[in-house]
Amino acid sequence: QFDADDFRAGNPRFQEEALAQNLAIVTEVQRVADGLDASPAQVALAWVMAQGPHVFAIPGTRRVEHLTENLGALEVVLSESDITALNSLPAPMGDRY
């Protein structure tokens, strides 16, 4: 499904079984994001920040529009049910690299 020169072609997280589970995670994050009029990236950052005062999100970005999107996470307020739903998601399947 990926070109041979695409790094995802050999990435364990993008292999059949892992991809199916990982896309289910993406679907749930997207569902939460849609309910908050936010992007999945903003929800992910808001979730990290909701883990407690001792946890810090350190997003990397190469583009100004991504920086603006990341800063928008400061305005995202996750409900207890959002946090519960996100906390209940399984860890991504497959090694990262």
Image: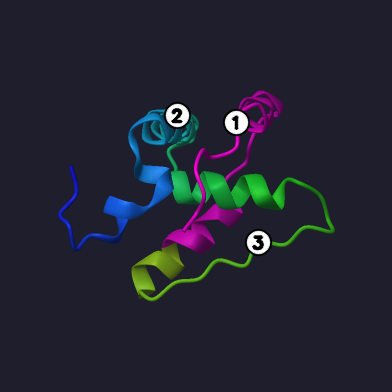
Q: Give the mark toward the camera: 3 or 1.
A: 1
The residue at the point 50 percent across, 31 percent down is 32
Name the amino acid type tagged 1.
Pro
Nearer the observer, 78 or 94: 94
Q: Dot 3 lies on which element?
A: loop
Q: Are marks 2 and 3 in contact (CB under 8 Å)?
A: no
| Dot label at residue 41 | none
Q: Dot 2 lies on which element?
A: helix
Question: Could you tell which of marks 1 and 2 lies nearer the N-terminus?
Answer: 2
Residue to which mark 1 is pinned: 90
Residue 27 lies in the magenta-colored region? no
Name the amino acid type tagged 2.
Gln
Quarter of the image holding residue 67?
A: bottom left
Distance in Å between CA atoms under marks 1 and 2 = 8 Å
Residue to which mark 3 is pinned: 57
| Dot label at residue 21 | 2
Mark 2 is surrounded, within 10 Å at the Cα level, by few (under 14), some (14 to 19) or many (20 or more) other residues, namely some
Q: Are marks 1 and 2 in contact (CB under 8 Å)?
A: yes
Task: Specify start and end residues of the magenta stretch as a single range.
Answer: 69-97
Task: Estimate the x, y position of residue 38 in percent, counting from the top left.
Answer: 44, 43
Q: Is residue 14 left or right of residue 56?
A: left
The residue at the point 15 percent across, 54 percent down is 3
Mark 3 is surrounded, within 10 Å at the Cα level, by few (under 14), some (14 to 19) or many (20 or more) other residues, namely some
The residue at the point 65 percent across, 61 percent down is 57
Residue 5 vs 76, above or below: the answer is below
Mark 1 is surrounded, within 10 Å at the Cα level, by few (under 14), some (14 to 19) or many (20 or more) other residues, namely few
Nearer the observer, 11 or 79: 11
Residue 82 lies in the magenta-colored region? yes
Question: Could you tell which of marks 2 and 3 lies nearer the N-terminus?
Answer: 2
Q: Can residue 38 be seen by looking at this rendering?
A: yes
